[in-house]
Image: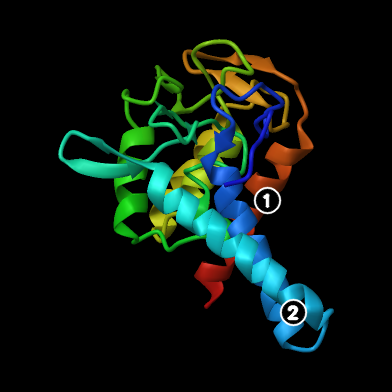
Amino acid sequence: MIWSGFRPSDDACKYGYLVPANMYAVVILQYLEDLINHGLGDQSLLSTIVEIKDQVIQGIQESALTTVGDYQIFAYEVDGLGNYNLMDDANVPSLLSLPYLGYCSNEDELYVNTRRFILSDQNPYYYKGKFLSGIGSPHTPESYVWPIALSMEGLTSDSVAKQKVVLETIADNDGDTLHVHESIHVDDPKKFTRESFSWADMTYCQLFLNVFENQVK
């Protein structure tokens, strides 16, 4: 696997092998492999790309899986020596975002199991309150949910009804600012970090376009 010092949130990793980042690397390496196979790259690079991709996949299979209760899930971080950090962070790449990134389908059994874990109180950064429930981050205060993670719940769901609920939830909790924030307190939408956050804007807009596209098909 590929070692990381920091998460997408800019927080330091607890363990150096950040599993969703490695999964995203597999997706990108597959893109490169496909480009070269279509004559759009240096053929001499192909064996190196395939070798790295296969090694990362093997590392994920051997080190990133653990058992919780009676089902297997992906860990968020591992050290390759048997230690696991069981959580998910709102920032992408995340475990929640794996189908969005193209690593697996949202019906993949391991993803379904992992999603069930991270969207529950078992994830130390999953918060529930009067107005919001969702994934937050150690990058922001406790009990603050990130609209990026809420949008990702919608973007990784096949349910248009679920996607509409997410859109309405984010819009209804803007703290009367008409902006999508970095994070929002679960019990008070007027408490938030970063009034305007373009990354959150982007994921919200993408979810809106997905809903619109499904409605006009």
Disc nearest the viewer among 1 and 2 = 2
Question: For mark 2, what is the residue?
Answer: 35
Question: For mark 1, what is the residue?
Answer: 205
Residue closer to the observer: 156 or 1: 1
Q: Could you tell me how far apart the alpha carbons at marks 1 and 2 are, in whole angstroms?
A: 29 Å
Say left or right for 197 vs 183. Answer: right
Where is residue 171? Give x, y as percent.
59, 36
Q: Residue at x 50, y 58 (%)?
A: 57
Say left or right for 130 vs 8. Answer: left
- The tag earlier along the polypeptide, 1 or 2, is 2
Where is residue 95? Give x, y as percent.
48, 43
Number of other residues with Cα within 10 Å of mark 1, as a class: few under 14, some 14 to 19, many 20 or more: some
Q: Amino acid at mark 1?
A: Cys
Where is residue 4? Give x, y as percent.
66, 35
Would you identify the image quadrant in which residue 139 lies?
top right
Q: Residue at x 40, y 52 (%)?
A: 61
Q: Amino acid at mark 2?
A: Leu
Colour logic = rainbow
Image height of 150 relative to 58, above or below? above
- Asked if the residue at tag 2 contacts the one at tag 1, i.e. Cβ–Cβ closer than 8 Å, the answer is no
Q: Secondary structure at mark 2?
A: helix
Residue 68 visible in this rendered orientation of the protein: yes
Where is residue 147? Give x, y as percent.
59, 34
Instruction: Count the numbered circles shown.
Output: 2
Q: Secondary structure at mark 1?
A: helix
